[in-house]
Image: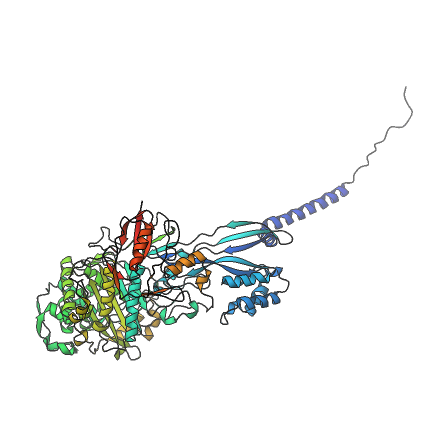
Amino acid sequence: MHSDSPPRQTLTAPIKRVRFVYVAAFFLFWTVVIAGRLVWLQLIRHEHYVEKAASQQERSVTVAPRRGLLYDRNLKELAMTVSVDSVFAVPKELSNPADVASLLAHVVHDDPEDRFTSEHSILARLSASRNFAWVAHRVTPEIAQRVKDLNLKGVYFQKEFKRFYPNNDLASQVLGYVGADDIGLGGLERAFEEDMHGTPGKVRTALDARRKALGSNEQEPLPGENLVLSIDANIQHIAERALDEQVEKTKALHGVAVVQDPHTGQILALAVSPRFNPNETRHLDPKALSNLAVSDVYEPGSTFKLVSYAAALDGAGVQPEDLVDCQGGAITLFGRVIHDDISDRGMHVVTVQKALEKSSDVGAIKMALKLGNERFYKYIRDFGFGDRSGIELPSETRGLLRPVRKWDPASIGSLAIGQEVGVTPIQLVTMVSTIANGGMYLPPHIILSETEKMKGDVELKPMPFRVMNELPKKLPDGSHRVISEMTSAKMRRMMAGIVTEGTGSLAALNGYSSGGKTGTAQKIDTATHTYSKTKHVASFAGIAPVSSPAIAVAVVIDTPTAGPSYYGGAVSAPVFADIAQQVLEYMGVPHDQPLTPKKNVAQLQRVAMEHDDHPEDSSADLNAMFAEANALPDDDPLKATASAGPAKLDPEPVPPPSKRASVLNLLPEKVLAAFRANGGANTFAETAENKPLAAPKIAPLAQRKEDGGIVVDATRRVAVPSFTGSALRQVVQQANAVGLRVQPVGSGLAREQVPAAGTMVPVGTQVVVRFLR
């Protein structure tokens, strides 16, 4: 049945197209805006907001790395680090920065000259940053406790390392020192700064809304490399003591003494007087900072005659027994008259050996003339003069040596007697070592190894000095032959004659043969470019024993002003004798001559002042020497001071002065006890039970100082006992009984010792004993 009702209509109204477009555009717009904002926040500004979040949610502190240690060849610590507190603040956590700065300054500002810890400086740093500001670096435990007692909100502590030199001024010019920012500023500390400094770490601490710590994430710092030096601390002490005594006795400006192993080129001791204490940087004397052994030059005078005679024997066929006419002690060379010492001006025809023993200038000049300019110059260069030696110390100069094309006609005569040439003590001792070892030039070295290992590691072993009678099979880089072995043997015999018959009589040893050459040179007046009439440099370079040289020693003393003489034979030769005698006995070198009672030694030594190498006035071309100083490379330490004279250098930079309590107070009690017990020489010596060794009781021959050090009477000598087969306790008891100290190596029973049993050594000497199971 059909219905008459109208058709059904749709309920949905048609959507207008325009409205749809508006709505879609609206949503598309906001989608683009939000997406763009997300790109801005997540990509472009991502790092900024991560850092901002980190600053609000965590605190990040840089952790300084442990600086590498410096050991001597027996693994005795020469430079180490101790952990101390430093104070910092988070300024935005402080209620009143001005009041906090005032409170902190009253505690940490203990040195009026230290501007870093003044109230004004602290407040300036607190105002300059919101998240971190240093208050004071490396404070003493007492100051740290006082800061903690203030209980200030926003003030925190961080452990930092402080450099400590347990032997105070021992080898200070070699070791150098570090500044307040733990950056090396001198010596090996400066030369190996990058290797020894290490890589800093970080500590990130998460904080809640109330700035309370929730946890931390640490990135450990990487410690710096450790250096093992060729120096033997005992030999260094011997050299410094002998040098200091003579510098003080003669009222000299300064002195240098270098002890070298002639068969390896290793430096066993490098002493400079006066020295400085790198633990007390506030009192550093700029004049004592430079390592004069490598950075300063002087005219060697008669010690350079060894080069002239060695070159003539090797290159011109001259023999020690040949005759040379010394012409009554005067020679005219291209219009220049050069005289011998007054006491030798009657000397005419003598043997070549006699001419050297009497230090005849005429004889030396005739030796050089036999070679000619070019060949003589080549020998000078082959001996290492006029070039850097390559020793691992900063600020080394190559010295002054003009090429042949710049010589005057008479320059060969001046060079033959050690004028118109500037040398360093390192170059001088290396030249003597070349003659001693058979004629092979070996570059000097002061670093044995660079290692990550610490003392106590089985892979890091001490390397006590052992006397070698021949060159190593593998020669170091830079080695080359200078003279033949036969020439070397002849020169050693002639050098022995200088001590027994010539100008070096005060270099004679008891029980050992010795040889060397004296030298006395006039200093150059830098204002007038002429030789000074009153200022001299006294030197001696020698070897011992002559038959089989174990050591080479060079001693240079600048401007001695007290005493009856300024000659090298009277001033420097006795220092050589003192050092060589003690070192040879310390090393247990067998005697090659009969021992003489002490009361007879002085009678056997003739007075060197009666016959020495007198420095005659010279008209050498000093203006040319100054011009050569200006021609040095820009990195040569003499270049900057050429106008002031080649022998003076600008001091190394001095860190800002700061006053601190003795660094000994920063050490733990156990370590401090060991330090005082061992006289500051072996802070971490341990027994097999890992306990510090007790000090030998020596009285009154060893007097204890207020700072814990020990002053040893080196005039009394004792025989080193035989420790072989003994346990550590027995070794210590035996050593204490005779007044010696012990540095144990390993554990078990004693199998090896240095010095050898029976060696006569000063009371208080430290004996290295190796123990094996």
Whether residue 545 sits left or right of residue 148 in the image: it is left
**Residue 265 or 86: which is nearer the viewer?**
86
| In the image, farthest residue toward the right | 4
Q: How many marks?
A: 0
Look at the image and tell me in which quarter the C terminus lies.
Answer: top left
Whether residue 667 sits left or right of residue 264 in the image: it is right
| In this view, 630 is above or below 670 | below
Q: Quadrant of residue 146?
A: bottom right
Whether residue 348 sits left or right of residue 679 in the image: it is left
| In this view, 262 is above or below 296 | above
| Snapshot colouring | rainbow
Q: Is residue 397 visible?
A: no
Q: Is residue 326 visible?
A: yes
Look at the image and tell me in which quarter the N terminus lies.
Answer: top right
Q: Quadrant of residue 168?
A: bottom left
| In this view, 135 is above or below 451 | below
| In the image, farthest residue toward the top | 1
**Residue 629 or 360: which is nearer the viewer?**
360
**Residue 441 or 179: which is nearer the viewer?**
179
Residue 680, image x and y in percent?
A: 37, 61
**Residue 497 or 391: which is nearer the viewer?**
497
Whether residue 62 sits left or right of residue 621 in the image: it is right
Residue 157, image x and y in percent?
A: 54, 58
Residue 221, image x and y in percent?
A: 47, 52
Residue 478, image x and y in percent?
A: 26, 56
